[in-house]
């Protein structure tokens, strides 16, 4: 049993209707793919999902270099199903600057084979059925925004390998529109989630920090937050147009001057603040 794993980092460039501003966000797609009895020559599900992303306006970026930098143990966790695989995928997504991870599994299995009379004589046809499962998860919040599956029996083929490829392709083709619909709605939203991590603070400072961040960032919404080992973590929902100015807002806003904070790191999905002293 062989596993063909595909990792694609994708950036989506979409425009709102008519004169609306263009919006960009990145998606990491991870699909371990297998046929239960034979090696699949090429990643059929990956090819179909890639084609759907490109047709929808996605820029597909080669993710092979990212795989080379992953240790064997981390790769095993990444291939795993369930929470462990999702956690490792989110870690990789954060490292690559992705806002959404699409994690999935795909496999195919021979259903039956049968002799068929043709002009060339008797040939054997193979019928293969495939199943694909996909879920889309926001990197910052670990919120699942899509979950779905498809099972498809492919057209009869003259080899088991071709039957596997055709059934996997059909299953991916069937689920792609639902996935793209969710991503499209996310990409055209006027608000975006950003994780704010505040370090070197006490538990009692949580409420004041939450209020200060709300005012400093003109947040549409902000979570109650989670506290662990001197660090508060908040999810802030704010207008997309304000995200590029997030560091300026945090550095210059009077609500965060006492106590003083410095920005340790920042990108479009996460900002880390550290209290001085």
Image (cartoon, helix red, strand yellow):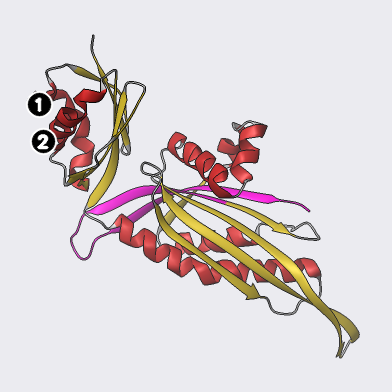
- Can residue 248 be seen in this snapshot? no
Q: State yes or no: residue 13 in magenta.
A: yes
Circles 1, 2 touching at the beta carbon (< 8 Å): yes
Quadrant of the image occupied by residue 120: bottom right
Q: Residues within 10 Å of mark 2 (few under 14, many from 20)?
A: some
Instruction: Please give the residue where the numbered disc 1 appears in the rendered image.
Output: 255
Q: How far across and down, in percent of the image, does residue 136 sit?
A: 45, 54
Q: Residue furthest left?
A: 254
Is 19 on the left-hand or right-hand side of 265? left
Dot 1 or dot 2, earlier in sequence: 2
Is 156 on the left-hand or right-hand side of 218? right
Q: Is residue 109 above or below residue 154?
A: above
Q: Residue furthest top?
A: 277
Q: Residues within 10 Å of mark 1 (few under 14, many from 20)?
A: some
* Predominant SS of the magenta segment: strand
Query: Residue visible at 14% across and 23% down?
Result: 256
Image: magenta residue range:
1-30
SS for dot 2: helix
Query: Residue visible at 27% across and 36% down?
Result: 225
- Can residue 189 be seen in this snapshot? yes
Marks 1 and 2 sit apart, C-alpha to C-alpha, by: 7 Å
Q: How far across and down, in percent of the image, does residue 263 sit?
A: 26, 22
Q: Residue furthest front?
A: 204
Q: How far across and down, in percent of the image, does residue 208 sit?
A: 15, 28
Q: State yes or no: residue 242 in magenta.
A: no
Q: Is residue 207 above or below residue 118?
A: above
Query: Residue visible at 56% across and 70% down?
Result: 150
Front-lying residue, 110 or 117: 110
Instruction: Please give the residue where the numbered disc 2 appears in the rendered image.
Output: 215
SS for dot 1: helix
Split into 4 quadrants, where in the image is the C terminus?
top left
Query: Residue visible at 63% across and 74% down?
Result: 152
């Amino acid at each position: 049993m062989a596993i063909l794993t595909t990792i694609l980092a994708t950036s989506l460039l979409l425009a709102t209707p008519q004169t609306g501003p263009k919006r960009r966000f990145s998606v990491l797609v991870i699909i371990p793919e297998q046929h239960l009895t034979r090696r699949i020559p090429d990643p059929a599900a990956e090819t179909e999902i890639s084609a759907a992303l490109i047709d929808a306006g996605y820029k597909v970026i080669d993710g092979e270099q990212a795989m080379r930098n992953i240790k064997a143990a981390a790769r095993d966790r990444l291939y795993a199903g369930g929470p462990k695989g999702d956690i490792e995928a989110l870690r990789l997504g954060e490292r690559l600057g992705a806002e959404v991870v699409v994690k999935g599994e795909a496999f195919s299995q021979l259903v039956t084979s049968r002799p068929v009379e043709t002009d060339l004589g008797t040939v054997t046809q193979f019928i293969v059925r495939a199943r694909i499962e996909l879920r889309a998860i926001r990197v910052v919040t670990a919120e699942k925004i899509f979950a779905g599956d498809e099972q498809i029996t492919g057209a009869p083929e003259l080899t088991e390998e071709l039957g596997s490829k055709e059934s996997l392709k059909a299953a991916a083709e069937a689920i792609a529109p639902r996935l793209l619909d969710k991503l499209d709605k996310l990409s055209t939203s006027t608000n975006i989630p950003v994780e704010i991590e505040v370090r070197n603070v006490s538990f009692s400072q949580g409420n004041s920090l939450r209020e200060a961040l709300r005012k400093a960032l003109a947040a549409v919404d902000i979570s109650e937050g989670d506290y662990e080992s001197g660090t508060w973590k908040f999810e802030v929902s704010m207008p997309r147009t304000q995200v590029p100015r997030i560091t300026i807002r945090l550095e210059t806003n009077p609500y965060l001057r006492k106590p003083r904070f410095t920005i340790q790191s920042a990108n479009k999905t996460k900002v880390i603040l550290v209290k001085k002293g």
